[in-house]
Image (cartoon, grey):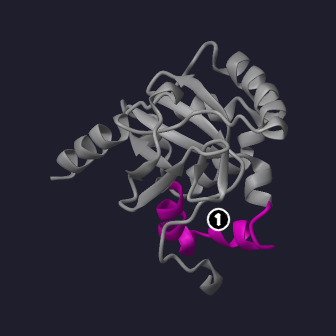
Amino acid sequence: MKKRSVAAAAMAASMLFVACSDDKDASTTTAAAETTMAAEGAEAGDIVAVASANPDFSTLVAAVGAAGLVETLQGPGPFTVFAPTNDAFAALPAGLVDKLLLPENKAVLAQILTYHVVAGKVMAADVTAGDVPSVEGSNITVTVDGGVKLNGAANVIATDVAASNGVIHVIDAVILPPGLDVSTL
């Protein structure tokens, strides 16, 4: 049953997804991020290896480890990962990242991280607006007016970072699954 859900998500995801912002400020940031990410993804390892090679993802890599998702994201995939930068995590309420990294919050952290993953390899050229199912199970709303945004909050700032088991698109905010209340942590 789970394999069918992943396959369905991959099919839905392949009909939608990510393109780069055409906003002037975002395009400057995007160009720098794409240059850095392209160099680091040149000899693409798996998603975890590519993210680990970039210091801008140290918080994400720590979170993936704390959530017990390293082996999953090193698996065959393919996966599309919307990777929040360290700055994106830093913009969360004070102390939240530290709380999420605690062992007692592993399930919540895994829920947040899997909400940033879509089954299948979705390249920037394949994007259209709409709802896309995440691996977590909830939809991510993609808009493309004035640049690509996820849930109206996270901007896609770099795209198509190659990994052997998928692709990474860099985002400037952490997105939370609908109904998740992190204020109770």
Tell whether 108 sits left or right of 53: left
Residue for point 84% across, 31% down: 28
- Image: 151 above or below 125: below
Tell whether 137 sits left or right of 19: left
- Image: 172 above or below 20: below
Point out the stretch of residues depicted in magenta.
Answer: 91-113
Residue found at the very far front of the displayed protein? 145
Q: Position of residue 184 (x, y in %)?
A: 61, 86
Q: Position of residue 149 (x, y in %)?
A: 61, 49
> Badge 1: few (under 14), some or many (20 or more) residues near its Cα, within 10 Å?
some
Residue found at the very far left of the displayed protein? 1
Q: Position of residue 10 (x, y in %)?
A: 31, 39
Three-letter code for the amino acid on which mark 1 is drawn: Leu
The prevailing secondary structure element of the residues shown in magenta is helix
Residue for point 61% across, 59% down: 152
Which residue corresponds to mark 1? 101
Residue found at the very far top of the displayed protein? 43
Q: Nearer the viewer, residue 122 or 109?
A: 122
Asked where in the image residue 6 lies, by quadrant, the reply is top left
User: Is residue 110 part of the magenta span, yes or no?
Assistant: yes
Q: Quadrant of the C terminus?
A: bottom right
User: Is residue 109 part of the magenta span, yes or no?
Assistant: yes
Residue for point 57% across, 26% down: 160
Q: Nearer the viewer, residue 110 or 173?
A: 173
Tell whether 184 sits left or right of 40: left
Q: Nearer the viewer, residue 141 or 66?
A: 141
Q: Position of residue 156 (x, y in %)?
A: 65, 42
Residue for point 46% across, 29% down: 166
- Image: 180 above or below 75: below
**Disc 1 element:** loop
Tell whether 37 sits left or right of 123: right
